[in-house]
Structure formats: C-alpha cells, structure tokens
Amino acid sequence: MRPATATAAAVTTLIGVGAATIAAGRYASDAALRPRPGRPLPGEPRLTVHATAAGQVTLTRHLASLRPGTYGLQGPDVHAVVGPVLDDVPHSADTVVRRLESVSLGILDRGSRVRLTPQLHTGTPATALGLDHEDMDIQGELGEMPAWFVPATRATWVIAVHGLGTTRAHTLNVMGFLHGLRLPVLAPAYRGDPGAPRPADGLGHLGDSEWRDLDAAIRHAVRHGADRVILYGWSTGASMALHAAANSGLRDRITGLVLDSPVLDWETTLRALATARRTPAPLLPLAVRAAQGRTGVHPDRIAEAADAGGLRVPTLLLHGPDDHLAPWQGSRELAARRPELVTLHTVAEAPHGAMWNADPHRYEEALRRFLTPLL
C-alpha cells in the first residue's frame, strides 16, 4: 500500500473508531439520564402475579418481593398497594404471599407483570388521601410547573420534591403525616415531569439544573405567606434541596432539610443507573464523560452543595446500606462530620427512595422528632 493510501486508511479508521466511541458514550449516558418519571427504577425486577385472594396476592419469589414494609405494585394499567409478607399462608417454594391493601387502578389478574415501587398512591391529595388541596402553577425559568398545595395553619411550609423513578405523587406517602402536624405542604413538579416543561436537551441532570425549579417553588411559597420553609427531598430531589440551601437567594428562609436517599456523588449514581440499564462495563467511563459533556453538569458543584462545612440548618438524613443507586457512605460521612446539625436515621432492607416503605412507623417517628423543634 502506498504511504498516502495507508495514511488515508488509518485516518478513516481512527475517525470510525472515534465516531463509534462517541456513539457508545451517548448511548450509555442516555441509559442513565433519560428521565422516566413515574416508571420503576432500572434494575427493579419484573414479578408475575400468580394468584389473588381476599386481602392477599401471590408473587414470584425474589429478594424484591421479600422486602419488608409497604410498597406500590405497578404494571401496565394497574396500580396496587401491598403490605407485609404473609409467612403463615400456604404457598409454593417459588412464590411469596403479601397482604394486598388496595387496588387503585385497573385489575390485578393472575399473570399480570408488575414491579414494586416506593410510590404508594395515584391521583391527587384529595382523591388519594381525602385532603383538601389547591392545584396551582409555579413560574420557573423554563415555564409554568404544576404543583399541589395542601393548606394548614402553621407559617412554616414544607416543600416536598420527588426524585428518580417517581412523580410528585411520591410525596403523598408522607403528606397525611405532615398535614397532621399542621404543616402546609407544597409539592411541585419540575422540568421533565408530566405537565412541566421539558429541558432543552431532554436529559435529567441529577439535580444540578433542576434545583432552580425548587428555588422557584421557594419564592412562590414566600410570596404566598410562608415565613419559613423546610425542604424535603427524595433522591435527586434531596440533591436539589442541598443546592437550594447553598445557593438560593432565599436560603435564609430555609430552616431545615429532610433528605431521603440523597444523591451525593453524581458519578457514582450515574454509573449505577447506566449499569442497572445493562450498559456494558467498558462503556461506563464513556457514559460519565458523555453525560458531563452533554448536560454541562459540574460534579464539583454537587460536591460543594453536599459539603458538610457549608450546612447551616438542621438536617435529617434517611438512608441505608441497601441503596445501590445512591450509596449511603456519603450520608454517613456527612452525619459524622456535623453531628450537631445532622441526624442520620438508618433504614435497612430498603432500595433507593424507599426508606419510608421499609418501616413507615419508625420513619415517621424519626421525622416527628426532627420536625417538632422546627415548628
């Protein structure tokens, strides 16, 4: 082969490899960052309904179906709520029987394919919990975002923000408890959610840009009568709360943070999401680089927002060792560095975003002890 021809062939090969590498990186980053609100998180196993009876449902035996606590059960056109495992009910070795609390959507038939979700409820505060509420719009930087507001008598408002794999309906899990403390609750959607504006790149940023929508919700609350606010976030919603507490122009109105399964390490969570969506391991470094380049996310900003030295208000962390999307090591370190401000409530056998589900009573008691001095 002549030198010029060989050089051209080599350049063409390098261009082809480069293009394939870029495409692989985009594929891997899409697997992690394409928002899928209201759908179970990647890696959550699909279970088969083997039988139903009065107050019980029989599911495929799996570590997921054996989890303690109360969960939503979600499938195509069906949503139900299941309670504890019923060990004393006869069943085959490859199945698990759980208490069936309710079916709020569709019909739970034999053969239905379902997944567990931390989101217990469908509908609104009124239809799901019987709570009077107002539907309102909050003006954010990308446009109007729908929100629920459940009024109460206190001047301290809770702004509750969902995270990965759920919608604002996830906040309904604790809304009745918060209402019982007479705390007004504002539960906004944010960019990428149903009814809210889509981000220009169509990607989720794990809280790095979404926090500005929470900032808009804080401004809305203050304009409409909130003297103080407590930010309550799950998953990326917890990251948004940390960003807002560090950077909001109204951060002096923030008097407390409740952080459930917080995403404190952007790269670790991104890798976990990509892995759960079956991204090959060799593509994971490409996924990180491609995601950062496509979204403009700055991991250092996330680290700064979660820095223990910057915390100024009491903070409750609710996290545990079985969260594989946002490992709890960061929460443990945060609590250890600021014990005078940070309380860690450890929850075992709970996946990401499901700390309440694993043990609602203990969770709400921890929440009560934390919130009472702030009321």
Image (cartoon, helix red, strand yellow):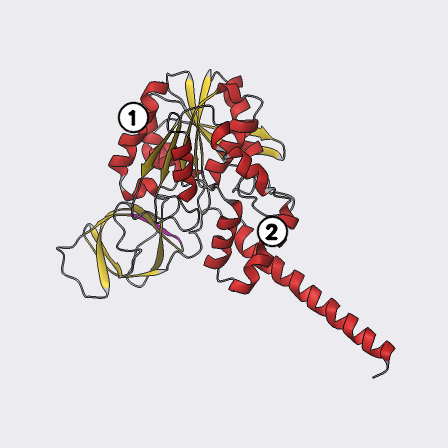
Q: Position of residue 3 (x, y in %)?
A: 86, 79
Residue at (43%, 52%) from the top-left corner?
A: 41
Disc 2 marks a residue whose amino acid type is Ala
Q: Nearer the viewer, residue 312 or 103?
A: 312
Q: Which residues are magenta?
A: 77-81
Q: Which residue is mark 1?
A: 369
Q: Position of residue 347 (x, y in %)?
A: 30, 42
As helix, strand or loop, the secondary structure at mark 1 comes to helix
As helix, strand or loop, the secondary structure at mark 2 comes to helix
Tell whether position 78 is magenta. yes
70 in relation to 361, above or below:
below
Residue at (53%, 53%) from the top-left corner?
A: 32
81 in relation to 90, above or below:
above
Taking the view exactly as shown, the residue that stands out farthest to the bottom is: 1
Residue at (56%, 45%) from the top-left corner?
A: 204
Which quarter of the figure is the C terminus placed in? Answer: top left
